[in-house]
Image (cartoon, rainbow, N blue to C red):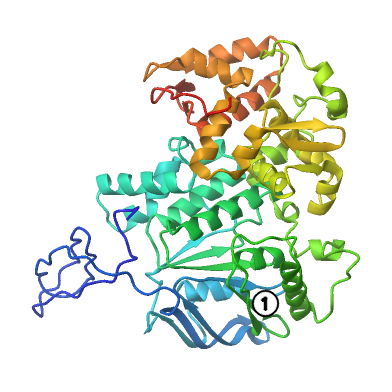
Amino acid sequence: MRFPFSRRAATVPVATVPAVPIPAVPIPAVPIPAVPGPAIPVPALPVPPAPEGDEVLLETVGLTKTYAGADGELPVLSGIDLTVRSGEIVALLGRSGSGSGKSTLLRCLAGLLPPSSGTVRYRGTPLAGANPGTALVFQTFALLPWLTVRQNVELGLEARGVAPRERARAAAQAIDLIGLTGFESAYPRELSGGMRQRVGFARALVVEPDVLMMDEPFSALDVLTAENLRGELLELWDSGQFPTRAVVLVTHNIEEAVLMADRIVVLGARPYGTIRETVEVGLERPRDRDCAAFDELVDRVYRIMTGRPKDPRQNGRSENDRSWNDRSDDNRSDDNRSDDDRSDAGEDDSRPDAGQDADQDDARPERRTVANTPLPTAGVDGLCGLAAMIAHRGGRCDLVDLADELGLDIDDLLPQVDALDLLGLAAIHGDDLLLTPEGTAFAGADAQDSRAVFAGAALDVPLVKLIANSLGDRVGATVRTGFLRDLLGRHYTREQTDRQLETATDWGRYAGLFSYDAGRQEYRQEHRPGPPAPGR
């Protein structure tokens, strides 16, 4: 088991003596449910996992939810009959802001809202409060800003009374699983939007819920970061390492639902939320967005939601669709923007001139230094997402076409394009962006191997190389940011220096090259660096 508190195995009943209530006592390898009476020790015997795909974990029968209004009860949901089984991802799909009640339904399933009538059952037992078998990932991250990544991840375990040592071990495993290694001591303000949402996922998964519930988890992210995070979560789910038995996803994005879900529950909104139709997806993973079956399913769901066919000339990407078919950068708040977003807003004057792409090789200095090689403001998740999209298109794509397909301006992509080029993971040829062999390896590797490829690439970037070489290979060595600020301050403004250090910190942490303590304002060598990835 990945985590010390596995819920994948069946529970073993314990003999009891009545009238002496005590709390459940965990026995290694055998979860013991809370029962009255002293627990009789049970040996750690192998227990076969519960059969996947046929056990009903959650069920609603005739669920109705209303709220009090000035003119009486206002209906939100009516007559919802729904089941969630082990081994499946279920998408609750409805138009954004349409009153379909999809988020309300999710909270009823989690036991956070009581139904006005009808029943919600978890493993056959009606809920009378918070659902003990679920954990929720929010759209707006909901992190405590005064806690580090590790402390935020441990919150759920701390609330359950888990001992500090076991809590730390489980949190470390969740952090590694979700791709946050190197960011354990970071505070939320130091993280891009994608990294903050990873903390939300780790915090939910560390308690190993039977059902992971996600309420528009990608809508506060830029399109490239969202694409990367979706892909990594699906990779974990398909690998069997995901420490949960089912997923319920709320979304307004049709393509996201078809890409991720096994079943799509389409909710109507007039005059209140009802299940309009349930669609079985039936496509093998990983799913190809360009295949005819995928397009046909997207068109079918679109017709169910709107009652009208798509305009084939728009290929599902009209301006009207953008409001609810996830062009998620429209929904972001300033506080949730990633580093990529800040550059999109014109805040990154350290980025090289975008008009130089055709002549970039000629203009590139013979010897790159921190003075002549500024870092573009581009977060790791956005880089991973762009590299994956290019790989999906055969390793080469026209940037104008890609931006148009994603519903972005070409300027929105340039920080990530510049960063991939700087890292040697892609090269610009005219209007096209091509992955290099290292970029192809980066895009095609699993999360752990892609970090190794990225580490080798990052060490060729002058500022990252400066920090890593200043630390050397002595474990415990430190470098103060004041030293780096003095060097950069000779060539850049204070704002440019801040942004470059933020990017270098993000890249170095992700690559495992060093850690950073914001309180002490210093970088630290936590372990002896290994050899760079092959091919560098």
Q: 39 and 54: which one is in front?
A: 54
Q: How many C-alpha atoms fall within 10 Å of the one at disc 1: few (<14), some, or many (≥20)?
A: many
Q: 441 and 105: which one is in front?
A: 441
Q: Is residue 522 left or right of residue 386?
A: left
Q: Residue drawn at (64%, 62%), measured in percent from left and top?
A: 287
Quadrant in which the N terminus appears: bottom left
Q: Is residue 60 left or right of residue 288?
A: left
- x then y, percent, for residue 196: 55, 46
Q: Residue drawn at (86%, 61%), measured in percent from left and top?
A: 319
Q: Report which quarter residue 439 is drawn in.
A: top right
Instruction: Tell me the element at label 1.
Output: loop
Q: Which residue is label 1 attached to?
A: 100
Amino acid at dot 1: Ser
State how many labels appear: 1
Q: Is residue 473 left or right of residue 31?
A: right
- x then y, percent, for residue 457: 60, 27
- x then y, percent, for residue 357: 84, 28
Q: Report which quarter residue 271 is drawn in.
A: bottom right
Quadrant in which the C terminus appears: top right
Q: Residue drawn at (83%, 61%), measured in percent from left and top?
A: 317
